[in-house]
C-alpha cells in the first residue's frame, strides 16, 4: 500500500463518502488512489473555489464533514475563499491539497508555494506531511478538529510522498500513534447559571428571542420556550429555516435585509434571549434590554450584545433544562401586538411585490415562488439584491432547508451550494436564487457541472432562478444610500446575457420571463420539469431593497444621490410607488 492509498483508506474510516474537487499533477497520487479504490465519490467542479463552496454546502445540509481537493499552487489558493466561507459560518470542511515534490521544496519550483502559511489564517489546523508515518495523526487530527471545532482544516501532500510506500508509525521514541474517531459531547450549563437566566427571563414583560443556525437542532425547544415566555422570535439569516414563517410570533429576518416587525420587536422588548446566533449588526439589537445568551461556542457569548447571563451549552439540551424553570406569561398583550405586526407586514410585502415595475418586480419573483415550493425543497441564495427578496419574500415551511454565504457574504455561492445540496439530498428538489453578476462571475460555469451530473439524481429538479437586471444591483443601492453617490455606470453596468438560451446549449431547460403575469406559470413549469432549469427573469434594477427603517442620514444621502443620478425620476417614482402601495394595499398606484 502506498501513502495515497492509505490516505483514502483513512478517509473512509472517518466516514468520508464524497470529495468535491479538481485534479492536477500535484495531487495525482491521491486521484489515482481514489480511482483504484472506488469507495469515495469524486465530484469534479469547474473551479476549485466552487468545489470548496460545494463542500461547505454539503456540510451545512448534512451536518457531516465536507471535503474538497485541489492540486498545489494556484489550485490550492483557489480553495481559500470557500474555506473562509466555512470559517465564517462554522462549518467542518477538510481541504486536501497537493504540493511540489519534497526534493525541490525551498527551490522556488514550479507551483511551489508555502501553502501552510497561505492557509494559516483560515484553517483551524494545517499541516504539510513530510513522511508517511506522519500521515495517520495528521489525518486524524485534521478531521477531528474540523468536526469538533466546526471549522476548516487543511492537509498538504507533496507529490512524491503520495507514491511512497506507507509505513505505519512504530512504538518508539520520536513516533506517535493515532487513531480515528470522535463523539461530540452534550454541553450544558450549571444549574445555578440556568436559574439566573430563568430569573432574568421571568422578570421580563416583553421578551424577544433571536435565533441563528446554532438553534437548528432545537426547533421544538425554541417553540416551547417562546410560547412559555410569550415571546416573539426574530431569525438571523443563517437561521431562516430553523422556524417556519407560518408561526404568527415569528417575525422573520433581522437586520438590513430584515423585516419591520423584527426591528419593532428589538426596539420594544425589555428582555432578549439569543440562541445560537452570531448576528453581526448590533445596531439592530435592543438599545437597552436585559439579556441571556446560549451558544455552543463560548467565543460568541456577549460578543454582539452585553448579556447579563451567558450560558455555554448545546441549544436543545440547554433550553430543555431551562424550560421547567420558566414561568408562563399570562398577559397576552405583547404576543398579540407581535402577531398584529406580522399580519400587517405580510400585506405590506404582497403590495410591494405586486407593484408595477419595468418589466418585472424582483420581489414578485420570490413572492410567486414561495407558495409553490415543495415541502422538502432546499433553497440557496447568492449575495446581492436577490438576498433581500430571499430574506423577506420566501416564507419558509417546516421541513424545508435553506442557506447562503452568511458571515463571508461571498458572491458566487448559490449554484455550488445548490450542487452540494443535490449531492447531500439527491431525492429533494433544489432552487438557487442568483443575480446576473454572479452568473457572469462564475456560476454559469458551474451549471456545466449540473449538466454533467443531473441524470444521477433521483429527483432531477434543480431550478436556477436568474435575476437579469444588467446591474450589480446591491452595490448600486449601497452607492446611493450609504455613500450618497449617483449610480456609477462604469462599475455597475453588466452585459445582457440570455441565460435561458445557455441552458438549452448545455442540455438543460431554459425559461425566459419578462411579463409579471407569466411568473406563476413559469415557476409551475420549472418545478415540474424533468431536468434542471434556468428560469431567467428580466427584473427592474430600480426597485429599492427598502430596509426596515430608513434613518434621516440615509434618506439625505439617497436624495443627494438622486440629484446627481440620470435615472432619478424612474428610481424615485418606483420607490414612492412601493411605499404608497403598501399603505393603500394596491398593486398599481401611480
Image (spheres, rainbow, N blue to C red):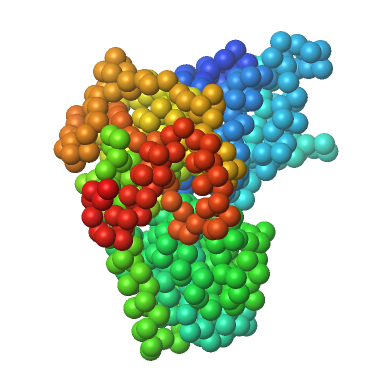
Which of the pair 177/414 is nearer the observer?
414
- Asked whether 215 or 404 is in front, the reply is 404
x then y, percent, for residue 140: 63, 40
Whether residue 444 is visible to the viewer of this picture, yes or no, is: yes
Q: Nearer the viewer, residue 470 or 422?
A: 470
Residue beneath the point at 47% across and 25% down: 493
Q: Residue furthest top?
A: 110
- Left/right placement of residue 195 relative to residue 433 reads right
Residue at image point 69% right, 33% down? 119
The reply to whether residue 479 is in sight is no
Answer above or below: position of 301 versus 512.
Answer: below
Residue 560 in picture, x, y percent from top left: 55, 44
Residue 512 horizontal/vertical position (percent): 24, 27
Identify which residue is drawn at 50% across, 76% down.
269
Q: How many marks?
A: 0
Quadrant in the picture for residue 379: top left
Q: Quadrant of the N terminus?
A: top right
Q: Residue at x 58, y 43 (%)?
A: 484
In the image, residue 59 lies at what x, y percent?
48, 43
Q: Quadrant of residue 162?
A: top right
Amino acid at each position: 500500500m502506498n501513502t495515497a492509498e492509505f490516505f483514502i483508506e483513512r478517509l473512509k474510516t472517518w466516514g468520508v463518502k464524497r470529495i468535491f474537487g479538481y485534479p492536477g499533477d500535484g495531487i495525482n497520487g491521491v486521484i489515482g488512489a481514489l480511482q483504484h479504490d472506488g469507495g469515495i465519490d469524486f465530484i469534479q467542479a469547474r473551479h476549485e473555489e466552487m468545489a470548496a463552496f460545494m463542500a461547505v454546502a454539503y456540510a451545512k445540509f448534512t451536518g457531516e464533514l465536507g471535503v474538497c481537493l485541489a492540486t498545489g499552487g494556484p489550485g490550492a489558493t483557489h480553495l481559500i475563499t470557500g474555506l473562509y466561507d466555512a470559517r465564517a459560518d462554522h462549518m467542518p470542511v477538510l481541504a486536501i491539497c497537493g504540493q511540489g515534490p519534497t526534493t525541490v521544496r525551498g527551490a522556488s519550483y514550479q507551483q511551489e508555494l508555502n501553502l501552510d502559511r497561505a492557509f494559516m489564517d483560515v484553517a483551524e489546523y494545517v499541516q504539510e506531511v513530510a513522511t508517511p508515518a506522519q500521515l495517520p495523526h495528521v489525518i486524524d487530527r485534521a478531521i477531528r478538529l474540523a468536526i469538533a471545532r466546526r471549522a476548516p482544516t487543511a492537509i498538504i501532500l507533496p507529490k512524491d510522498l503520495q507514491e511512497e510506500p506507507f509505513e505505519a508509525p512504530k512504538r518508539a521514541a520520536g513516533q506517535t500513534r493515532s487513531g480515528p474517531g470522535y463523539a461530540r459531547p452534550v454541553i450544558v450549563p450549571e444549574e445555578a447559571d440556568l436559574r439566573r437566566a430563568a430569573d432574568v427571563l421571568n422578570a421580563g414583560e416583553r421578551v424577544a428571542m433571536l435565533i441563528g443556525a446554532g438553534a437548528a437542532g432545537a426547533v421544538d425547544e425554541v417553540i416551547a420556550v417562546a410560547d412559555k415566555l410569550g415571546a416573539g422570535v426574530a431569525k438571523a439569516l443563517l437561521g431562516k429555516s430553523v422556524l417556519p414563517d407560518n408561526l404568527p410570533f415569528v417575525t422573520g429576518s433581522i437586520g438590513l435585509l430584515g423585516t419591520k416587525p423584527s426591528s419593532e420587536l428589538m426596539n420594544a422588548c425589555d428582555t432578549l434571549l439569543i440562541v445560537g446566533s452570531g448576528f453581526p449588526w448590533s445596531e439592530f439589537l435592543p438599545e437597552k434590554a436585559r439579556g441571556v445568551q446560549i451558544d455552543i461556542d463560548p467565543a460568541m457569548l456577549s460578543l454582539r450584545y452585553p448579556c447579563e447571563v451567558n450560558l455555554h451549552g448545546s441549544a436543545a439540551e440547554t433550553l430543555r433544562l431551562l424550560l421547567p424553570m420558566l414561568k408562563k406569561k399570562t398577559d397576552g398583550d405583547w404576543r398579540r401586538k407581535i402577531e398584529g405586526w406580522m399580519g400587517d407586514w405580510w400585506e405590506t410585502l404582497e403590495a410591494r411585490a405586486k407593484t408595477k415595475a419595468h418589466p418585472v418586480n424582483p420581489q414578485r419573483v420570490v413572492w410567486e415562488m414561495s407558495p409553490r415550493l415543495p415541502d422538502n425543497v432546499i433553497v440557496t441564495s447568492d449575495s446581492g439584491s436577490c438576498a433581500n427578496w430571499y430574506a423577506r419574500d420566501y416564507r419558509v415551511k417546516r421541513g424545508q432547508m435553506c442557506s447562503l454565504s452568511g458571515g463571508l457574504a461571498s458572491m458566487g455561492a448559490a449554484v455550488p451550494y445548490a450542487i452540494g445540496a443535490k449531492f447531500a439530498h439527491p431525492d429533494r428538489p433544489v432552487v438557487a436564487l442568483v443575480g446576473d453578476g454572479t452568473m457572469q462571475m462564475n456560476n454559469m460555469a458551474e451549471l456545466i457541472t449540473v449538466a454533467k451530473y443531473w441524470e444521477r439524481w433521483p429527483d432531477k429538479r434543480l431550478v436556477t432562478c436568474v435575476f437579469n437586471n444588467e446591474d450589480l444591483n446591491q452595490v448600486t443601492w449601497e452607492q446611493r444610500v450609504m455613500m450618497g453617490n449617483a449610480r456609477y455606470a462604469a462599475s455597475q453596468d453588466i452585459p445582457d446575457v440570455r441565460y435561458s438560451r445557455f441552458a438549452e446549449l448545455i442540455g438543460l431547460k431554459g425559461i425566459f420571463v419578462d411579463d409579471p403575469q407569466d411568473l406563476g406559470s413559469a415557476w409551475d413549469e420549472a418545478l415540474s420539469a424533468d431536468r434542471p432549469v434556468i428560469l431567467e427573469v428580466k427584473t427592474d434594477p430600480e426597485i429599492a431593497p427598502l430596509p426596515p427603517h430608513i434613518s434621516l442620514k440615509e434618506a439625505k444621502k439617497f436624495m443627494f444621490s438622486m440629484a446627481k443620478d440620470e435615472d432619478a425620476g424612474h428610481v424615485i417614482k418606483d420607490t414612492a410607488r412601493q411605499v404608497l402601495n403598501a399603505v393603500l394595499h394596491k398593486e398599481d398606484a401611480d
